[in-house]
Image: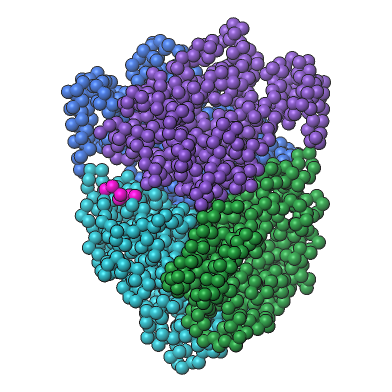
Chain colours: A green, B purple, C blue, D cyan
Amino acid sequence: MSYIEQKLSEGKVFKDPVHGFVHVSDQMIWDLIATKEFQRLRRIRQLGTTSLTFHGAEHSRFNHSLGVYEIVRQIIDVTFADEYRLSNEERMTALCAALLHDLGHGPFSHAFEKVFHTDHEAYTQKIITGKTEVREVLLRAGTDFPSLVASIINKTHENQTLVKLISSQLDADRMDYLLRDAYYTGVSYGKFDMERILRVLRPSPDGNGVIIKYSGMHAVEDYLMSRYQMYQQVYFHPVSRSGEVLLWKILNRAKSLYHAGYEFKTNPAQIIPFLSDEVGLDDYLALDDAILTFYFSVWQQEDDEILSDLCNRFLNRRLLRYVDYNPSSDADFYNQLKGCLEKAEVDPAYYLVVDSSSDLPYDLYKPGASSGKTPIQLLLPNGDLKELSTESPIVESIGGKIRTDIKLYFPLDFIENGRIPAEIAEEMVTLIHEKQNKKPS
Amino acid sequence: MSYIEQKLSEGKVFKDPVHGFVHVSDQMIWDLIATKEFQRLRRIRQLGTTSLTFHGAEHSRFNHSLGVYEIVRQIIDVTFADEYRLSNEERMTALCAALLHDLGHGPFSHAFEKVFHTDHEAYTQKIITGKTEVREVLLRAGTDFPSLVASIINKTHENQTLVKLISSQLDADRMDYLLRDAYYTGVSYGKFDMERILRVLRPSPDGNGVIIKYSGMHAVEDYLMSRYQMYQQVYFHPVSRSGEVLLWKILNRAKSLYHAGYEFKTNPAQIIPFLSDEVGLDDYLALDDAILTFYFSVWQQEDDEILSDLCNRFLNRRLLRYVDYNPSSDADFYNQLKGCLEKAEVDPAYYLVVDSSSDLPYDLYKPGASSGKTPIQLLLPNGDLKELSTESPIVESIGGKIRTDIKLYFPLDFIENGRIPAEIAEEMVTLIHEKQNKKPS
Amino acid sequence: MSYIEQKLSEGKVFKDPVHGFVHVSDQMIWDLIATKEFQRLRRIRQLGTTSLTFHGAEHSRFNHSLGVYEIVRQIIDVTFADEYRLSNEERMTALCAALLHDLGHGPFSHAFEKVFHTDHEAYTQKIITGKTEVREVLLRAGTDFPSLVASIINKTHENQTLVKLISSQLDADRMDYLLRDAYYTGVSYGKFDMERILRVLRPSPDGNGVIIKYSGMHAVEDYLMSRYQMYQQVYFHPVSRSGEVLLWKILNRAKSLYHAGYEFKTNPAQIIPFLSDEVGLDDYLALDDAILTFYFSVWQQEDDEILSDLCNRFLNRRLLRYVDYNPSSDADFYNQLKGCLEKAEVDPAYYLVVDSSSDLPYDLYKPGASSGKTPIQLLLPNGDLKELSTESPIVESIGGKIRTDIKLYFPLDFIENGRIPAEIAEEMVTLIHEKQNKKPS
Amino acid sequence: MSYIEQKLSEGKVFKDPVHGFVHVSDQMIWDLIATKEFQRLRRIRQLGTTSLTFHGAEHSRFNHSLGVYEIVRQIIDVTFADEYRLSNEERMTALCAALLHDLGHGPFSHAFEKVFHTDHEAYTQKIITGKTEVREVLLRAGTDFPSLVASIINKTHENQTLVKLISSQLDADRMDYLLRDAYYTGVSYGKFDMERILRVLRPSPDGNGVIIKYSGMHAVEDYLMSRYQMYQQVYFHPVSRSGEVLLWKILNRAKSLYHAGYEFKTNPAQIIPFLSDEVGLDDYLALDDAILTFYFSVWQQEDDEILSDLCNRFLNRRLLRYVDYNPSSDADFYNQLKGCLEKAEVDPAYYLVVDSSSDLPYDLYKPGASSGKTPIQLLLPNGDLKELSTESPIVESIGGKIRTDIKLYFPLDFIENGRIPAEIAEEMVTLIHEKQNKKPS
């Protein structure tokens, strides 16, 4: 029997708070979970700095990856069981892709990528096809198998139905993270009836994705509403973004010090490849939340005041505060604040930061094909297909309408604790109060 | 100490699956619950025929009334505790109104009112101010107290904040029934974060209702989305409406037989006052689901074939089937079906029924004041008030946009079981198939 | 294809708050649900008078019967799928038995059977094999099929594994009612990890039931603990039993009046067969909660004061109150109270009632075979079987140790409202206070 | 107004998945949460190695500490509100103690303390009374306030009711961790009706703790059963203990290498004080999960094979496997395995490890006073107090009866992957198989 068809002598389960259980019966899935590249995901939080706002959200990408696998498994083995038979190879390719789709995420991906120009999607491809334990396991199924799996994730696989299961407007990835992030944060918004969606999912007749039976329209409305709410309430939360801003500035500062020849008390060995822009796959895989956190911790003792202050802020949750910011009408306000900081010798490059929610990886439902994403199709009772938003006024209204939220972050504590001289502080307080009380235009 | 202020020696609780516990510490509330008019609500289902579609939804109005009371109690005693002190009398008036607001509902209200022109809201007023145990309890708080309570329910009380707690676009009544009906049906749509809404509720500064702090906007969006979903998925469900149609036609037939001098085998003593249009308050209070169900049960043995068939259908869930129906374009179809039934001697007055969801008590959020309902106001951080839909694109889209769903009901089983002669049956089947396959215009 | 193998063209689901969905794909199951005998279960509450204590518990036996079917379906089609292949006939026999096992329950079974000596188990057998729609459907699968189904329910079927799925110490019936009753009452006690139990269930090697893999022992402990708690907290609740006492006495009084030639204002047509002890199957099936409730309602207007008072009490929840009662040591107390009531011309036969929880259908786990029930066997890792309580100290302690709870019920309101003359009332109050303050011996 | 009475201008909430919200209205609590010693708890997992078994359990002690605070807040401000008025100082002392009770926990406490003989309880005292931000905040309430708070935690405070709220057989600490650990692991065992327990809790009349009203007995039974199940199923899980064994051996090896003068490639600066037994408070506070994990990560590249192998195992979840082990009867087996390992040059000091669940901090309910813990007292309806286990057969049976579970851990992978020569490996396999198949004596 080929490796792809090999079953465990007894099915294994992982107790999962979101799906009840994650079921594994395939030897290959079991072996992939045991690789060190997959185990590394235990040390990378799913939601980065969100736990600074929602303390419950301390779960890892390991957690989420098992969940995505489980959803795809249910779709293939239960929903599609009778109607849409996949070959054993197709089935296993999809399961592996589901499990491994986030393998390339590094610690605090968003801020890290912004500073070091790494790309987690590219790294997922490299880990699957490069010199890793993961590839070794995949090769047992054939020389081409690693690239087959990778092609599902990069969306070039010829079976677009499988591709769309893992990445589309209604995919296992989004379904898992909404449910999971809602569970761990404790908010009620992310919940929707996944069981019903799984029941009404069908492969699309043109082989180009999945469609939804008309009777499931309201469950999908609910799912899209959850997505909208989770973005507005959790993922774009200005306090979590304040943590992101600190991370971004810490890494920026470290990079700038490195290039200026600064001598770190503790040599940041694992970060050097990124600072010097000579990154190998092993360097990338050696990073995780603990490594970065270790350096943030020791950098609190660095002589560079900016670096040590920013690290102290991040670890001890002494966040920058914010006001709403409108780039077109608030330029004066920005410049005045900037002037104040400069007068007080607080570097605005690190302490006066504009952050826009639109910089975050963001995806609300967009009906138009122009978004590059296949829209969700409904299968009407008479056999026709119609794009979801033409049937649902709710979805029509959500489509693309999210408001970009821009904040200006600044160190309120410097104003309060004397770090900024009293006179300047007073001026800043006045500026900020005026800004806050200004009627929205 | 006045009766209004009298506390139970020990607080009582009712275990409630939706709110955890319903807490009662006031003697007056305790006494009201013990009245026979309130206990009667145990014998009236909250959702009438919905359990024919969602078998879990067998809960009574007793259940719901306690829930509404509990929400108002939490708002008054917890949310408003410090900021908005009510007098003892105001507090108790609001609690009583919350508890008693549905007192006038009869069995299967919707169909019953359609046939007998009773009005449950008017009866609520009568029960509170008429010769009842409820009024006796209320009188212990003063001669005017019954009419004070009634005036909250009929919205004429001078404190409109209290009025709006019980009846407005965002009130304790709606919050309880959405959560409760979702719980008992088992659907996931009705859930929203009530705890958060209760935290952000404030009396409106103009004394004309309640407003919502801006930070709670998304919780309110979620609540309105739940309302939309529950209406579309549960309350307007065409199968439940098929049960409603039967009820309506049963009562119609009984009325028509009575006026034609038909002699019932079992004298429908409790229904006679309604048939003869001489209804006293006691006659109304004597009715409940059991009384009507008893007659439906014995009417299965009546000689009148229509009455006995309709009762048999209702009790044994042999429902009429339906097709979508468009009054403007489907007139031919309707007339052809009607012709067939007449040829087969099946009375179309009872067996070919158009039902529109817009006949149901229906209330989606409407932003405009023209609806007669105060729109929901948001309290912005700068102190301004804005109507919800101007801030929320979701709400803007839901406002008033629900689609009316019209169905035509007919006895498919008569076609299948030979009650309608084969030739006519064949013609009907062809008509119905054509209708179902017609592309929507 | 035989009727037993016939599938619906499209699988149907019932939304169920406990199991998520109840799945039906077999034509036969669909047809059985549509019979009038099964639909009748919608009109019979699962928990009788429990909703007088836990207002949420208004669910019907229809509800529960679908749940038991769903559990057995999951065990057969999922848990046993690969390891224990049943023939199509065996499978359908078990599914039908699960669905129909409670068919013979009448309204308020416990009190009704006590007075009229009917037996719901015998009626289940009669309905399955007698002249009913249910039997007609079953006959489509063969002449013997009705008695095959009946033999699972009465435990004589040769495949004892199937018998034990539906009736044993760990069966689908108990699992469903614990979860369901907990859900509707809202108590947290009834919950246990059914999904895990279903995963570790195996047919026993001797063909004599089901066993549990050792790894599931703690889930079973939890299930038994839930059972213990639900009995102590919900099923034996003294307030619900107070409702039972009233029902019992109402029916007793009606019977006694009937035999004394009393003329009822409204002829209790549907109850006459029971009063006169000439009950046919159709008479039994004609009863439901609504019929009995109708008569309780009209009997409130009867001239017989005892009957009308008891009915008023039952419908308006004016319950008898209670004290703990020890038959061996409280005889004096009982006789003194009885004397008081007699002096006050309150008939103690109806108003002084001893009720023991041990009269209720009661089944805690009993390890010994002497109970007539097969004990639960654990499958140890080395292949041995051991009785559960030998491995689990918790189970050992629960086994058979429930305390019988005996209460004495009496009309406290008669003492308070003047129905009992002041002097006697005072004596009674003294007696009761003394009883309540007596240290337990 | 004194600092102790100072309220925030607006109450703050933390969204909490277990309690819904954690409410903070006191300035002092807010300030304590903001200290760096409290924020450090974000970087220390509540359950150490448990996430190797239950992947969902990645929550921190920060999470749990807020939960304990919230429970105590509810008891003081709601349950006790009317009946048991505390002074403002007493109230704040208890709230601070609840929040800070786990402050002294370090990373992977259990294994760490075993190797370095630190004591997290002593450190909690030191952090509260030593040179820390926490003490600075506490001092604002008076010179004695830090030691007052500390005395609640070390149980010497004169108000034993407050002491027992935080540490007793039924305290806020245990209630929170059972509910929280159940939520994050996803197991159903840890759930119990905390809301009910909070409702029936009373200060004991002798001022020596808290008691439970009789009506809450079953809720407490359920809580104790949950505790039993969580210990058996989660806390003592042999796979998590396998992770603990690795941690223990890693730290042991590092210590032993250090004392042998081994030169680490990366100087373990933060661990040196512990290796050299010269630990200051700041050294202790500098540690967290990230610091240790960083060193485990870099130690994978150390030349010492044992250290690098053990670290690789821990980070990549290559755990030791286990068999049941009975010290009195399995000595031969142990010695034979040990002999094999020695022959294969695998050091048994690191690779053959006996671990007993009784080494874990363990506390099942013990009724006797001999345990040093006050037993749980029930308040009977007649005013008497009785120890819980005398009333509850369930509790009687749980009391002290937990079975110690002893496992012997060994590197099965060395046997399978050739690290141990084939001949010896075969011998070991035979030994292990014999052991596993031996009937339990």
The quarter of the image holding the C terminus of chain D is bottom left
Q: Quick check: C307 above or below D399?
A: above
Residue at the image point whose x is 71% and y is 16% from the top: B347
Quarter residue D62 falls in: bottom left
Main SS, magenta residues? loop
Does B8 lie within the magenta span? no
Part of the protein shown in magenta: D78-83
Seen as rendered, the residue at the extreme bottom is: D261
The quarter of the image holding the N terminus of chain D is bottom left
> Is residue D341 something one can see in this rendering?
no
Position of residue C387 measured from the top left corner of the image (x, y, whole percent): 45, 54
Give the side of residue D79 with respect to residue A408, left or right: left
Q: Quick check: C42 above or below A71?
A: above
Position of residue A439 measured from the top left corner of the image (x, y, whole percent): 55, 52
Q: Nearer the viewer, residue B213 or C160?
A: B213
Does D81 lie within the magenta span? yes
Position of residue C104 measured from the top left corner of the image (x, y, whole percent): 52, 30
